[in-house]
Image (cartoon, grey):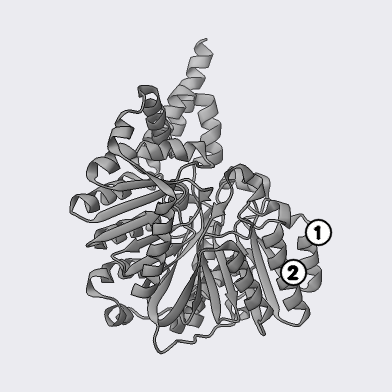
Amino acid sequence: MTLVLILYALLVLSFSIRILLRDDLSPPARLAWFIVLVLLPYVGGVAYFLFGEIDLGNRAHRLHDRVFAEIRQRASQFMGQPADIERHIERIYRPVFRYAASINGFHPVAGNRACVLDDADETIRRMVADMDAATDHIHVLYYIWLNDRTGTAIAEALIRAAQRGVVCRAIADGLGSRQLIGSVLWHRMQLAGVQVAVALPFNRLFRTIFFSRLDLRNHRKITVIDARVTYCGSRNCADPEFLPKAGYAPWIDIMLRFEGPVVAQNQLLFASDWMQATGQRCDCIPLKAEPHAEGFPALVMGAGPTERPRVTPQLYVSLFASAEHRLTLTTPYFVPDPTTLEALCAAALRGVEVTLIFPRRNDSWVVAAASHSYYHQLLDAGCRIYEHGRGLLHAKILTVDGRVCMIGSSNLDMRSFDLNYENNILLQDEGITTTIDRCQQEYIGQARRVELPEVLAWPFYRRIWNNVIATLGPVL
């Protein structure tokens, strides 16, 4: 018995010291790990060993720094200039764009245009048509790439393009696209001449377990065609029926098809992933910019575990703070950190119309419970909460005052904040933002509003469950 107690004390003490030595952990995350280690020391110790650290290692950080140094040296003319913020962005939103520019060095570039694609069939038709019209190159990166109708259509378009001499490069995440990577379709792409790479592969499993984390993933969705067109949004390379979790279908997404100088910035973000996955140099990626005379300013933001910590929640807070009249957030996974939560409440309390749209049924029970734990505080501050009921609303969009919009792969949760590689485009344009606002109004039309009396009437055991899960959120 004494030996067991000594082992227990040593285990808890050693992991506690490690946790206290980490400057990157928030106090709630430290508290969550302490609770798990005290209550379940052996299970908690194994969990921390596998999932507690967010660092990919010094080698990954050095490679990331070298890649972006090379990109800045070769392609600084495509990254925009600080003066462009003063030139193109309204005064009230300049701090937001300055902060976004500090993440990767991408500044807002004017002369862009875009169209909103909120229908799955239309999105795949436009993508395949653009790929079939490609004459120079196609670059794609997807977190989830399935062997279904959509995944096969994109793969076949790449095969056709490669066979007619177009340079095609494709990256798939080692976990999210694991079935495709081992499939006949992936092999056919290679035989046709498509250059393929796997982001964060599992070919060095023991190295990953001992020096990194298994669940650090590349969650980006990037498509670039001839340096002329790029797509950005929440849609993976998969059907809306999403067979791995068909019980939650259809998955409802939104994409933007962009033309203009922001395409080159998305190309550079793809290049950074390609260089890190393959070791190739930046000069293998063609670059050009084609501004339009009447186009809006936009910039690309890429976040990840090798970027500066906490960039995504800090950008969200900056956007919330910039809102004067109206702020509408759509996200499937809502597990904010305390600062982000307080910023949302503060916006509502100062008179901003804050509307939050979440799915009614979530594919993650952890996220569902944690999200519900914040409803009371949000509703009490004056936020409006709608739960969308048709399938799983997977769109990730934020609109501010009908003027500024951010769209991409980032959720408002701890995974997107700390663990995943994400990509987003931040833009200022009344026309595009209004169109996206209309999409959000359609989501609200298919949703039910959650009122404060309903939340206050939840039974005590449900409230306890939600708050326990939210407390352990940084661990789960």
Name the amino acid, label 2.
Glu
Q: Position of residue 142 (x, y in %)?
A: 60, 61
At label 1, counting other C-alpha atoms closer than 10 Å, the crowd grade (few under 14, some 14-19, many 20 or more) is: few
Q: Position of residue 343 (x, y in %)?
A: 27, 51
> Image point 46% across, 31% down: which residue?
14
Furthest toward the front, the residue is 445
Residue 127 in the figure: left or right of residue 422: right
Name the amino acid, label 1.
Val
Mark 2 highlights which residue?
156
**Labelled disc at residue 184:** 1
Q: Quadrant of residue 155?
A: bottom right
Residue 109 visible at all: no
Q: Position of residue 6 (x, y in %)?
A: 48, 18
At label 2, counting other C-alpha atoms closer than 10 Å, the crowd grade (few under 14, some 14-19, many 20 or more) is: some
Rounded to the nearest angstrom, the CA distance separating label 1 from label 2 is 12 Å
Number of numbered labels in the structure image: 2
> Image point 58% across, 67% down: which residue?
123
